Image (cartoon, rainbow, N blue to C red):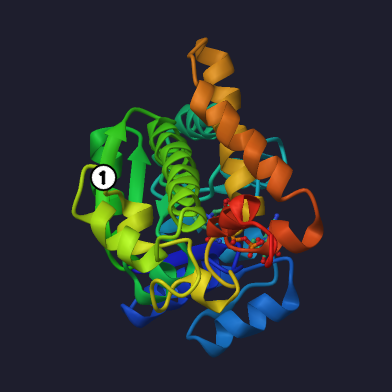
């Protein structure tokens, strides 16, 4: 596999396409934004004038788009890419979208004999830049195996979750749990602080005890406890409240579809809605949920 068409060069797609180019692939890139396109060209990609032009001579298509609607519009229908793709081309969609949208795209590709996988990512913009993303793939085992060399140029963990759509299900299960333990961690830290404990000391105790979890160990939400995390730079950078709300929305839709009981996921979504109701908070990193529990100074 030599030439990769890359569609969607935003905060995630831009660095992912750059890593593919760095690994020796010829990357024909397209984005609706000229600014993103020029930045990809500066990072070793070849500019395409349209998505259709990008897939010409491509061995694989990778997409990293904001929504299910964007992915469906790109691939499906009479003007969609699937109608224009050669059978040998592999379709890899890395966007976070609903499992149903992913299955629809993969089925449409299958009808034309085209191999396709859903491969949403975990890791955020820092991992996208470092090439250390985790990919959660859904699709046939052989198709996932064919996607592996492409994914390995952008990530360090590649999981096969199951049939089409399973990558998306794994992704929203993980992010629902992430939201829940982040909120629980913020709540516990504030309880300690309100009762006179130093959040750094409490974090050290809980890390070594049964309350230990990823949010506490790698992404402490209390300002000043851990260096290099969003909490220590006014919750800038990282994974936004808006994106967490998108993933929690997908989780709740999936739970409704399977009649699954997800009371903590529903509460987590409500708390993030309460916290991220304005444009300022929704742009902050999701660990800023700590502010929902913090008391005003002097209280
Ligand atoms: P972004 O908004 O920065 O980038 C999306 C890009 O897609 C934009 O540059 C936009 O111009 C382009 N685009 C939209 N429609 C297009 C079309 N039809 N053709 C070509 N280009 C089009 O978003 P992002 O942060 O890069 O996120 C992309 C996906 O990755 C989302 O599904 C998101 O949920 C997921 N994700 C994001 C993160 C993160 O930390 N940002 C982490 C994990 C997963």
In the image, what residue occupies the spot 50% across and 21% down?
262
Q: Position of residue 255 (x, y in %)?
A: 53, 20
Q: Position of residue 129 (x, y in %)?
A: 42, 75
| 155 shown above or below 22 | above
In the image, what residue occupies the spot 59% across and 59% down?
288
The residue identified by callout 1 is: 159
Can residue 65 be seen at all in this image of the molecule?
Answer: no
Q: Which of the two residues, 281 or 5, is positioned nearer the viewer here?
A: 281
Query: Looking at the image, which residue sits at the far left?
Result: 208
Query: Looking at the image, which residue sits at the far top?
Result: 259
- 157 to the left or right of 118: left
In the image, what residue occupies the spot 35% across and 42% down?
137
Quarter-of-image position of residue 159: top left
| 160 shown above or below 34 | above
The total number of labels drawn is: 1
Q: Position of residue 103 (x, y in %)?
A: 50, 28
Q: Quadrant of the N terminus?
A: bottom left
Q: Position of residue 256 (x, y in %)?
A: 58, 16
């Amino acid at each position: 596999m030599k030439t990769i068409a890359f569609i969607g060069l935003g905060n995630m797609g831009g660095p992912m396409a750059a890593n593919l180019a760095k690994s020796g692939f010829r990357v024909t890139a397209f984005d609706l934004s000229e600014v993103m396109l020029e930045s990809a060209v500066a990072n070793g990609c070849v500019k395409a004038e349209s998505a259709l032009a990008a897939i010409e001579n491509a061995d694989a298509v990778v997409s990293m788009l904001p929504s299910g609607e964007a992915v469906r519009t790109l691939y499906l229908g009479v003007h969609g890419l699937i109608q224009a793709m050669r059978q040998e081309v592999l379709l890899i969609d890395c966007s976070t979208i609903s499992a149903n949208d992913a299955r629809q795209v993969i089925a449409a590709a299958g009808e034309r004999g085209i191999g396709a996988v859903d491969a949403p990512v975990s890791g955020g913009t820092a991992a996208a830049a470092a090439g250390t993303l985790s990919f959660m793939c859904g699709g046939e085992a052989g198709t996932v195996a064919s996607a592996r060399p492409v994914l390995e140029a952008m990530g360090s963990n590649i999981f096969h979750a199951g049939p089409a759509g399973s990558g998306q299900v794994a992704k929203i299960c993980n992010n629902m749990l992430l939201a829940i333990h982040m909120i629980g961690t913020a709540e516990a830290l504030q309880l300690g602080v309100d009762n006179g404990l130093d959040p750094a000391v409490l974090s050290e105790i809980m890390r070594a005890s049964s309350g230990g979890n990823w949010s506490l160990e790698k992404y402490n939400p209390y300002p000043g406890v851990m260096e290099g995390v969003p909490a220590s730079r006014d919750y800038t950078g990282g994974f936004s409240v808006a994106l967490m709300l998108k993933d929690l929305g997908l989780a709740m839709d999936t739970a409704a579809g399977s009649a699954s009981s997800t009371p903590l996921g529903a509460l987590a979504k409500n708390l993030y809605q309460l916290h991220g109701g304005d444009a300022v908070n929704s742009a902050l990193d999701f660990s800023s949920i700590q502010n929902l529990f913090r008391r005003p100074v002097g209280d």
